[in-house]
Image (cartoon, helix red, strand yellow):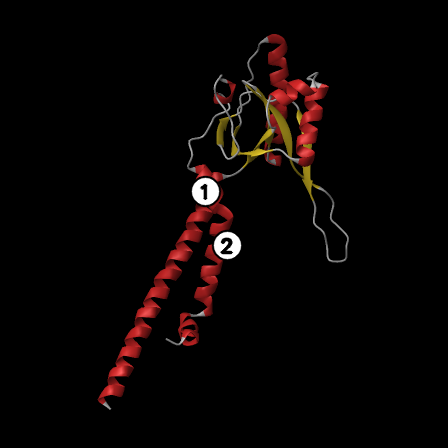
Amino acid sequence: MDIKRFLEGFGKGTLLMLFVGGIMLYQTTSEFLVSLKPAISFADMLEEGTVLRPGDHVGGEVVYALDYFATESTYTRYSDGSRSGDRKAGRYYLIPTASGFVGLKSREQDVAALDTLSEETFTYLESGAEPSTQIYTEGIVQVMEGDEAGFFTDYLESMGYTKEEIDAMGEPLLIRYRSFMAIRIMFLIGASLCLLTIFLLCRRYKALCRDLEVARKIGTAG
């Protein structure tokens, strides 16, 4: 079969659809699979026996939050070498668990609520008044590395924890916000594009085979 003829008949637009669908699947498959796992809630993390591991799915109302230990900002680098001003992109909060602490990387739009919850958490530790701020978030558990881990450790040390006590808490973990609904939608769109392309590919292949068979029969009859 003439592959060049086959691909030309298939169409560049359809091949582009396959490429886009493949990229979307590549970018979302791993986190789509995480989204299918049962979510561990922030309340669960306060119970003895709950163990967080990299790749876990976390989701629910944040129960307690201590102060933030780092911030994140983004900027745009232009072709002439200059850059835009920093744009705030959320903060890293300290979240208590039954076995120690984990980090929570928030969205910028959740900072105000988490700051309020942090103040209420410190009030709770002093007076016993339960926090009233409600904020839902979800994310994926990752291992902290580089500056993230350094800031996390520095903050714990400023709270009075020794290096030995921090090491005993295990590897520093971070809950990084993810919109799993958006991830599921992107995954399904990517899968649909790939399946549609495969369907068109099969239909084109069958049509080309029929054309070749007709041409063969005409040649034989002649």
**Image position of 23 with respect to 90: above or below:** below
The percent position of residue 35, horizontal first and vertical second, equals 45, 37
Q: Which residue is mark 2?
A: 23
Disc 2 crowd rating (10 Å Cα; few below 14, some 14-19, many 20+) is: few
Which residue lies at the image location 35% right of the left edge and 69% below the top edge?
204
Which residue lies at the image location 49% right of the left edge and 52% below the top edge?
24
Which residue lies at the image location 51% right of the left edge and 22% below the top edge?
45
The residue positioned farthest toward the bottom in the image shown: 222
Viewer-nearest residue: 170 or 14: 170
Report helix, strand or loop for mark 1.
helix
Tag 2–tag 1 contact (CB < 8 Å) = no
The percent position of residue 214, horizontal first and vertical second, equals 26, 80
Q: Disc 2 and disc 1: Cα gap in Å? A: 14 Å
**Image position of 44 with respect to 53: above or below:** above
Quarter holding the C terminus? bottom left
Quarter holding the N terminus? bottom left
Q: Which residue is mark 1?
A: 32
Residue type, label 2: Ile
| Left or right placement of residue 184 versus residue 214 in this view | right
Report helix, strand or loop for mark 2.
helix
Which residue lies at the image location 46% right of the left edge and 38% below the top edge?
34
Residue type, label 1: Phe
The percent position of residue 141, horizontal first and vertical second, equals 54, 33
